[in-house]
Image (cartoon, helix red, strand yellow):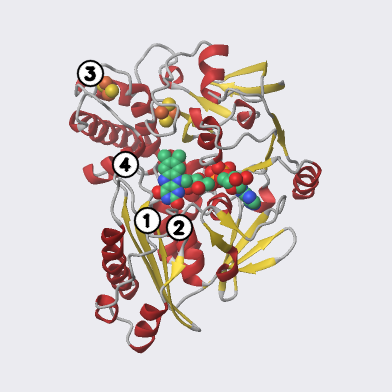
Amino acid sequence: MITYPFEYTRAQSLDEAVALAAAEPDAKILAGGQTLIPTMKQRLAAPPRLIDISRLSQLSFIRRDGDALVIGATTRHADVASSADVMEAIPALALLAGEIGDPAVRHLGTIGGSLANNDPAADYPAAALGLGATLTTNKRSLAADDFFTGMFSTALEEGEILTEISFPLAEKAGYCKFPNPASRYAMVGVFVAKTKVGARVAVTGAGSCVFRVPRMEAALNADFTSEAVAGISVPADDLNSDLHGSAEYRAHLVTVMAKRAVEAANRT
Amino acid sequence: MTTVTMTVNGKTVSADVEDRTLLVQFLRDELQLTGTHIGCDTSQCGACVVHLDSRAVKSCTIFAAQADGAEVTTIEGLAPDGRLHPVQEAFREHHGLQCGFCTPGMIMTAVDMIRRKPKLDRQTIRAELEGNLCRCTGYQNIVDAIEAAAQQMAAIKSAGSVA
Ligand SMILES: Cc1cc2nc3c(=O)[nH]c(=O)nc-3n(C[C@H](O)[C@H](O)[C@H](O)COP(=O)(O)OP(=O)(O)OC[C@H]3O[C@@H](n4cnc5c(N)ncnc54)[C@H](O)[C@@H]3O)c2cc1C
Ligand code: FES
Ligand code: FES
């Protein structure tokens, strides 16, 4: 139940959504609602207006574009998980989407909502950073390295709407997460990729925001095997400590998940 | 207020609702379809699962206004003429419920998973039940029921396609 009133508007076009968002700075974009609605119930957010973009068919697509896979912002997790195009181009991405939450969450939640929300334990940010994706909004394009700026924060400006995400195809990619047994969010999740410009390693769940591990990347550039990362650990100092696990435990999991992600990548 | 119109269990319904009305409130309070339960209201338990345009969703985590124009099926819609759906029958047969509070959501989730994955092994059934919590049964009999229903429905389907 939501205990305070607000107004709901279903945008008929991206332009209308952008105009509505510009006209009312406190309004919020509603996509799958799988984060925003629970947040509103807890009153962690109380926007006066929701602008629903989830029915905009122009933002819901999966398209192969040369050496990249482009996914529209309102594409549901279930559609990414079951897409033959994603499975062929970047199987790790389809598998990652299929491990988000549960079937009902995957039927409504969207890739754009997940990336815009940038939950420290969300899965998609690891794929976007791990593959070096480009995120496009109604205004501009941003590299994943510049998009995720901190805990629940991104480079998106007020009223800016994410429209599509372009993932460069990788020679190999793998994702492995240790899910929290209750929520399925990542205690620690590691995405590794052997890209055209070198190896990339992105870690979610462990810190306040998804981050890369340059030492593991250097080791994988020399030798793309799980043994190469086995001896590399990240310092526990800045990692999350909560009732689910200590920072030291998470630091340990980063190395274990990284090894398994490399093994998964080498199997594809 | 917003006027919402949708098809619920095959019937077109229309009502003026406050924008903050969740789909589950619309179903239970406006339409008196109280088979859909609210267990947690925090998107975790799955007692509120219904089908929206043929996909299982948590009706406590979507506004009624978002379902405007959509087709919704609730547990009441599975047995329109009073004859139990094969999944309902299997839950009865295999004792897949005790208090019954989680059952509507379990059954709607089961029907959805059988439609998407006609070949279901027990591990897949358990993974697909990730978003449905039961405080009573220990899940064993729920998994038995879904496994049996999936097999029975596959048999009916293949018999149908031969005839
Ligand atoms: C029970 C449960 C389990 C979950 N488990 C996981 C899990 O294991 N892993 C995981 O990664 N996630 C998990 N989630 C979160 C889920 O993936 C959400 O779907 C996702 O985080 C948000 O996507 P959404 O489309 O639902 O966005 P919404 O909830 O609609 O929006 C989230 C935020 O993003 C903004 N936003 C949405 N779309 C855009 C856009 N295109 N441009 C700009 N801003 C936008 C909104 O204004 C809002 O602030 C879980 C959720 C639940 C309820
Ligand atoms: S009442 Fe909707 S998930 Fe529990
Ligand atoms: S039968 Fe009681 S909660 Fe499942």
CA distance separating discs 4 and 3: 22 Å
Q: Amino acid at mark 4?
A: Ala
Check contact, mark 2 vs mark 1: CB within 8 A: yes
Specify the quadrant that holds the N terminus of chain B: top right
In the rendered image of this protein, does residue A28 appear above or below residue A81? above
Q: Amino acid at mark 2?
A: Ser
CA distance separating discs 2 and 1: 7 Å
User: Nearer the N terminus, badge 2 or badge 1?
Assistant: 2
Discs 2 and 3 carry the same chain letter: no
Discs 2 and 1 carry the same chain letter: yes
Work out whether residue A89 can be spotted.
no
Query: Going 56% across and 39% down the picture, which residue do you hit?
Result: A36
User: Nearer the N terminus, badge 4 or badge 1?
Assistant: 4
State which chain disc 4 sits on: A
> Could you say where residue A221 lies in the image, as x and y percent from the top left?
39, 86
User: Nearer the N terminus, badge 4 or badge 2?
Assistant: 4
Q: Nearer the viewer, mark 4 or mark 3?
A: 4
Q: Nearer the viewer, mark 4 or mark 2?
A: 2
Check contact, mark 3 vs mark 1: CB within 8 A: no
Q: Tell me, for residue B98, which label it has, or none.
A: 3
In the rendered image of this protein, does residue B113 appear above or below residue A250? above
Residue highlighted by disc 1: A240
Disc 1: CA contacts within 10 A as few (<14), some (14-19) or many (>=20): many
Discs 4 and 1 carry the same chain letter: yes
Q: Tell me, for residue A182, which label it has, or none.
A: 4
> Could you say where residue A159 lies in the image, as x and y percent from the top left?
72, 50
Residue highlighted by disc 2: A208
Work out whether residue B84 can be spotted.
yes
